[in-house]
C-alpha cells in the first residue's frame, strides 16, 4: 500500500526522503514522488516505476530544501502515471496520502463548481484543493488542515507542506498508520517505523483523529477533540541494519532462512526458564471460553485455519474461522463468552481491523497475534501476543506465518493444559517438538538445491494443485498462495479427499500436483489419492518424510524430503519447502520476488 514520509529540519532533507522511500519499497508501489519548499515555491519530482527512477530524476534536476514530503503509490483511484503520482499540489500546498477518501466524487464536484481544476484522477487531489480553499479564507496552515479534514469521509494518513510556511510540516491520521520521530535537529513523519528506522531511535504512534504540527524543534499533537496531547514514546525496534537483505539475493530468501531463529525466539518468549508454558503471558481462562472465532486475511488466515485443528483436537474448544473481508459484512451471530483471535503481520490490514471492530461490538474478548507491536490491531486488542519475527520486508509472508503458527500452537497447548485435555507426556512431547523445529527447518532447507531442480521442471506450468489433509490442508492453501503471488502460476489448494469430487478432471501429464503426505494417521488415505492421480498420468510432486518417500516415490515425478516430526508441528515444517519451491519458480520465471506485481505488503484499504 502507499507509503508516506515527511521531514523538516536544519539541513537538506531531500536525501533522507529518498532513503526513507527506499525503505518503504517493500509495501508495494507503482510510482513515487517527492515535494519540497524551495524559496517560497513548491517543487516536485514524480516518476512511474522504481525509486531509482525518482533518484535519477533528482540527480538531473536536484532539489535542496529543509522541508519536504515523499510517497510511494499503490494505485487505487486512477492508473499508475506521473499525473496520478503523489505528492499532489496546488500553488500553495502539497500533500501525500495513504488511505481512501470515500466522498471524493461529491467533494470534487463541489470544488470544480468553485473553479478548481484537477490534474489527476485521484481521490487525494480533492484534499489539496480543500486545504487551498481554506487557506484562501486567511486561515493558518493548521486551521486550514483541521477544517478541511472535517469534510472528509474515509481513511487517511497525510503529510502536508505549505509554500508560505517553510517552517511547518503537518500530519494527520484516521484509519491509516502514521508515526513520528525526531533526531539531531530534524523531525520526521512516516507510515511506519521502517520508514523512520535509519533516522530515529524513538517513535510516537499517532491515534485516530490526531493532527500533528511539526517544526524543526517541536512536535505538537492535537487529538480528535482538538486538545493538545502527549503520546507515548516507543523505542524503534527496527534498526537501519535489520532492514538490509545481505548476504541474500532477496528479502524473501533471507526471511525464509531466518525462520529457525524467529521461531526459536517466539517459542522462548512464551516459555518459563523451567520449560513450562508461561501462563502469565497468556492471560486467558480457557475453561470459560465457549467458542473461538479466528479472523485474518491471506496467509495470516491460513495460520488461523491450521490452529482450528489444534484448538479443536488438543483443547476441545469449538472454532469458527473466517476471512476478515467476508466476516465484516456477514453480520455473524457470535457466542457469549467467546474469544476472537485476530492474526496480522502488519497489524494494519483494513479488513482485519474492521472485522475485529465488529467482534468487539458483539462483546467478544480480542486476542491479537501481531508482528508489528504498536500497530492499530495491537492497540485495540485486550490481549496482544507478539510474534518475534523481526521486520518482514518481502511481500510474500514467510517468517511471520511460521511464527504465527508457533504462537497459535502454544495457545492451543496452554488451553489444553488449562482444560486438562492433554496428558503431561503429550504436552512435553509437543513442546520438545517445537523446540526442535529450528533444527528440522534447517534440515528441510538443505533440500533447496533439489527443490530448485523441480522448479526448473514446473516453471512453465499454467496451473498447479496443492493437496493436503487435516492440518496440512491449510498448508496446501498457503503453498498455492505463495506460488500464485510470486511466480504468477495459477495454483489451488485442495483437501486431498475432495479431489475425486471434481478437480481430478483437471489431471493431465502437464499439471504439477504437489501432495503433502507425512507418515501420520492420514498417510494411507493420502497415498490412495496419489494412486488415483498417478493412474491418470498426473505429475505428482510428493512432499514427505523418508518413510513416506520409500512407500510412494515410485508414484511421483519428483519428491521433496522433509524431516519426520511430531504430528502437531508438521504444518510449521512442511510449509518451508513450499516457500522454497515458490521462490525458485518465481526466480526462474524472471519475476521480482520481493515486490510481485499488483501486490502490497500491508493492505490498508478495502
Ligand atoms: C502473504 O504472502 C500476503 N502477501 C498476504 O496474503 C497477507 O498475509 C495478508 O494481506 C494479511 O496481511 P497481514 O498479516 O499484515 O494482516
Image: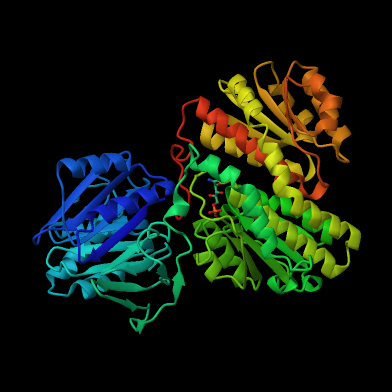
375 left or right, relative to 218? right
Find the residue positioned furthest to the left. Answer: 39
Taking the image as drawn, is residue 423 in sight?
no
Q: Position of residue 497 (x, y in %)?
A: 80, 35
Relative image position of residue 202 (x, y in whole percent): 41, 69
User: Which image quarter: residue 42?
Assistant: bottom left
Q: Position of residue 324 (x, y in %)?
A: 59, 55
Q: Is residue 446 left or right of residue 24?
A: right
Q: Quadrant of residue 414?
A: bottom right
- Is residue 310 in view from this perspective? yes
Q: Which residue shows up at 66% across the image and 26% down it?
A: 450
Left or right: where 582 falls relative to 127: right
Task: Report the number of discs.
Answer: 0
Work out whether residue 445 or residue 132 is closer to the camera in this orientation and state it: 445
Q: Residue at x 39, y 51 (%)?
A: 24
Where residue 170 appears, x then y in whole percent?
A: 26, 68
Please, is residue 459 above or below residue 94 in the view?
A: above
Amino acid at each position: 500500500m502507499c507509503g508516506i514520509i515527511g521531514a523538516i529540519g536544519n539541513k537538506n532533507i531531500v536525501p533522507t526522503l529518498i532513503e526513507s522511500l527506499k525503505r518503504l519499497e517493500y509495501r508495494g508501489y507503482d510510482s513515487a514522488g517527492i515535494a519540497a519548499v524551495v524559496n517560497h515555491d513548491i517543487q516536485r519530482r514524480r516518476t512511474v516505476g522504481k525509486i531509482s527512477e525518482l533518484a535519477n530524476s533528482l540527480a538531473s534536476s536536484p532539489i535542496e530544501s529543509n522541508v519536504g514530503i515523499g510517497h510511494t503509490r499503490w494505485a487505487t483511484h486512477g492508473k499508475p502515471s506521473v499525473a496520478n503520482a503523489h505528492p499532489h499540489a496546488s500553488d500553495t500546498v502539497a500533500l501525500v496520502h495513504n488511505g481512501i477518501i470515500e466522498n471524493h466524487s461529491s467533494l470534487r464536484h463541489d470544488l470544480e463548481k468553485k473553479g478548481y481544476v484537477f490534474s489527476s484522477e485521484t481521490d487525494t487531489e480533492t484534499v489539496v484543493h480543500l486545504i487551498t480553499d481554506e487557506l484562501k479564507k486567511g486561515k493558518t496552515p493548521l486551521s486550514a488542515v483541521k477544517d478541511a479534514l472535517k469534510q472528509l469521509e474515509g481513511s487517511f494518513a497525510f503529510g502536508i507542506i505549505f509554500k508560505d510556511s517553510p517552517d511547518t510540516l503537518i500530519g494527520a491520521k484516521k484509519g491509516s498508520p502514521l508515526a513520528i520521530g525526531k533526531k539531531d535537529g530534524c523531525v520526521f513523519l512516516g507510515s511506519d517505523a521502517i520508514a523512520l528506522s535509519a533516522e530515529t531511535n524513538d517513535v510516537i504512534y499517532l491515534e485516530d483523529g490526531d493532527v500533528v504540527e511539526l517544526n524543526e524543534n517541536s512536535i505538537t499533537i492535537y487529538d480528535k477533540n482538538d486538545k493538545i496531547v502527549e503520546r507515548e514514546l516507543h523505542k524503534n525496534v527496527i534498526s537501519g541494519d535489520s532492514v538490509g537483505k545481505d548476504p541474500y539475493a532477496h528479502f524473501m530468501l533471507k526471511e525464509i532462512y531466518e525462520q529457525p531463529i524467529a521461531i526459536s525466539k517466539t517459542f522462548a518468549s512464551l516459555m518459563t526458564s523451567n520449560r513450562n508454558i508461561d501462563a502469565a503471558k497468556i492471560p486467558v481462562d480457557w475453561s470459560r471460553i465457549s467458542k473461538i472465532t479466528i479472523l485474518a486475511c491471506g496467509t495470516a488466515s491460513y495460520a488461523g485455519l491450521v490452529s482450528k485443528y489444534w484448538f479443536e483436537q488438543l483443547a476441545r474448544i469449538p472454532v469458527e474461522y473466517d476471512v476478515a473481508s467476508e466476516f465484516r459484512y456477514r453480520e455473524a451471530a457470535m457466542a457469549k463468552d467467546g474469544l476472537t483471535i485476530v492474526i496480522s503481520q502488519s497489524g494494519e490490514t483494513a479488513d482485519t481491523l474492521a472485522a475485529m471492530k465488529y467482534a468487539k461490538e458483539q462483546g467478544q474478548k480480542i486476542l491479537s497475534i501481531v508482528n508489528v507491536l504498536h500497530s492499530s490491531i495491537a492497540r485495540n486488542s485486550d490481549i496482544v501476543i507478539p510474534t518475534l519475527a523481526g521486520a518482514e520486508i518481502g511481500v510474500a509472508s514467510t517468517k511471520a506465518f511460521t511464527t504465527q503458527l508457533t504462537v497459535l500452537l502454544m495457545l492451543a497447548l496452554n488451553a489444553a493444559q488449562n482444560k486438562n485435555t492433554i496428558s503431561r507426556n503429550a504436552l512435553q512431547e509437543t513442546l520438545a517438538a517445537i523446540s526442535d523445529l529450528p533444527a528440522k527447518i534447517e534440515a528441510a532447507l538443505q533440500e533447496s538445491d533439489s527443490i530448485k531442480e523441480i522448479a526448473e521442471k514446473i516453471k512453465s506450468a499454467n496451473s498447479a494443485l496443492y493437496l493436503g489433509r487435516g492440518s496440512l490442508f491449510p498448508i496446501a492453501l498457503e503453498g498455492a498462495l505463495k506460488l500464485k503471488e510470486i511466480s504468477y502460476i495459477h495454483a489451488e489448494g485442495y483437501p486431498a479427499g475432495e479431489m475425486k469430487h471434481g478437480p481430478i478432471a483437471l489431471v493431465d501429464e502437464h499439471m504439477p500436483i504437489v501432495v503433502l503426505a507425512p507418515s501420520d494417521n492420514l498417510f494411507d488415505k493420502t497415498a490412495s489419492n496419489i494412486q488415483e492421480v498417478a493412474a491418470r498420468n498426473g505429475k505428482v510432486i510428493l512432499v514427505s518424510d523418508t518413510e513416506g518417500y520409500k512407500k510412494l516415490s515410485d508414484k511421483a515425478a519428483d519428491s521433496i524430503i522433509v524431516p519426520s516430526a511430531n504430528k502437531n508441528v508438521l504444518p510449521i515444517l512442511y510449509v518451508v519447502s513450499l516457500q522454497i519451491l515458490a521462490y525458485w519458480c518465481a526466480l526462474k520465471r524472471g519475476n521480482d520476488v520481493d515486490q510481485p506485481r499488483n501486490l502490497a505488503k500491508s493492505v490498508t484499504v478495502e
